[in-house]
Image (cartoon, rainbow, N blue to C red):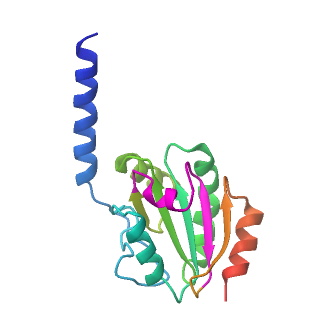
Amino acid sequence: MVLAPLVLAAVLSTGCAHDAAATGTVPAENATTAPALPTVADELPAMDADGFRQLLQQLRGTPVVVNYWAAWCPPCKAETPLLVEAHRRLGHAIQFLGVDLQDFRDGARAFMHQQGVTYPSVFDPANSIGLSFNLFSPPMTQFYDADGRLVATVRGQLSEDALQANLNAIAR
């Protein structure tokens, strides 16, 4: 019993150290370019709330869909196929972007590979980005028009109808 906490701490610290050093392998299919926009979908660069707001500023001129997710989140797993399909159809004209919250990179990358996600995500294990939007637990999806205005926020699992209606609202 005395050794159990030590063993757990050793396993967790080893996992975190390996996790932070990993890099992605899936080229991102982006609708636009921006200095802070990942070009590798599963690179999962660390980002905080300030960096994320700068990224959103850089994406002005292109409609944007932001999905806040985690690999451990059942509603996220259920909605991801809808986002992957919408990205397949509209990813040339609308920038899709994920924010992986409260997660480990290795698990997040495995999730992205299993789901066939080819749009980029940023990594926010502390949930600073989510908290800046009053999100305490994923999922949530935001829709921005090309002028950078937030048009809609869907809290909780995204339905196909809500996705389509909000894509129509931000499309040119």
Residue 92 visible? yes
Give the side of residue 149 with respect to residue 108, left or right. Answer: right
Is residue 129 part of the magenta span, yes or no? Answer: yes
Residue occupying the point 28% across, 34% down: 12
In which quarter of the view is residue 9 placed? Answer: top left
Question: Compared with residue 34, is residue 96 higher up or lower down, i.e. above or below?
Answer: above
Q: Position of residue 25 (x, y in %)?
A: 33, 62
Q: Taking 108 as reference, is 81 left or right?
A: right
Q: Is residue 171 left or right of residue 46?
A: right
Residue 26 sits in quarter: bottom left
The location of residue 32, given as percent across then percent down, is 46, 84
Residue at (45, 73) in percent of width and height: 53
Question: Which x, y percent locates residue 106?
Answer: 35, 48
In the rendered image of this protein, does residue 40 appear above or below residue 11?
below
User: Most extreme residue toward the top, as rendered?
Assistant: 1
| Residue 130 x, y percent position in the rendering | 51, 58
Quadrant containing the C terminus in the rendered view: bottom right
Residue at x 38%, y 70% (from the top left corner): 51
Question: In percent of the image, x 23 and y 15: which residue is there?
Answer: 3
The residue stretch that appears in magenta: 124-145
Picture layout, residue 86 above or below residue 35: above
Above-or-below relation of 25 to 172: above
Quarter of the figure with the N terminus = top left
Q: Of 129 and 95, which appears nearest the observer?
A: 129
Q: Is residue 28 left or right of residue 31?
A: left
The tally of labels here is: 0
Report whether residue 116 is seen: no
